[in-house]
Image (cartoon, helix red, strand yellow):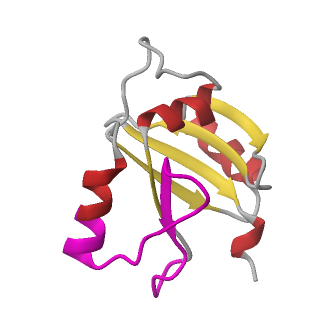
Amino acid sequence: MTDLGESRNFYKELFGVPLEYEGASYYTATNEMEGLKHFGLWTLLNAARSVFDQSEWPTDVPIPQGIIEFDVEDVAEAVSEMKPKGAEILQGRRVEPRGQTTVCFLSPKGLLIGITYTPRLRN
């Protein structure tokens, strides 16, 4: 996805997801959906910045068709269980500016998967 407008409209209008901006126009999210803590949308450009710290998705890595994040209690433990099962890590463990710990890999079907620990979701 290179533009959030179409996706924002799809989720907000069709499914009634109460999207709100979180400080920037490149990322849209909500923490107000019953049954889950967070739902967010972001562009491929920002995924490339987050995962690879560069302004374009690498040409040697398949472009993901979507992203899903699993927030866990212990990122290192979760990743140590996944690596022997074939998970190919794209981005090793790092702490993001907002305090979230992340590791990313790509599924065989092209889904960017984040394993995260997000302190603000643990109230």
Identify the residue shown where x is 66% and y is 54%: 116
Of 21 and 60, which appears nearest the observer? 21
Identify the residue shown where x is 56% and y is 48%: 114
Q: Is residue 86 visible?
A: no
Q: Is residue 51 visible?
A: yes
Location of residue 59 with respect to 68 vertically, above or below: above
The picture places residue 66, in percent across and down from the top left corner, at 36, 45
Identify the residue shown where x is 75% and y is 46%: 96
Q: Quadrant of the N terminus?
A: top left
Identify the residue shown where x is 53% and y is 29%: 48
Residue range highlighted in magenta: 10-36
Of 94 and 105, which appears nearest the observer? 94
Location of residue 116 with respect to 89 vertically, above or below: below
The picture places residue 103, in percent across and down from the top left corner, at 66, 42
Residue farthest to the left? 14
Q: 16 left or right of 76?
A: left
Location of residue 114 with respect to 58 vertically, above or below: below
The picture places residue 123, in percent across and down from the top left corner, at 76, 83
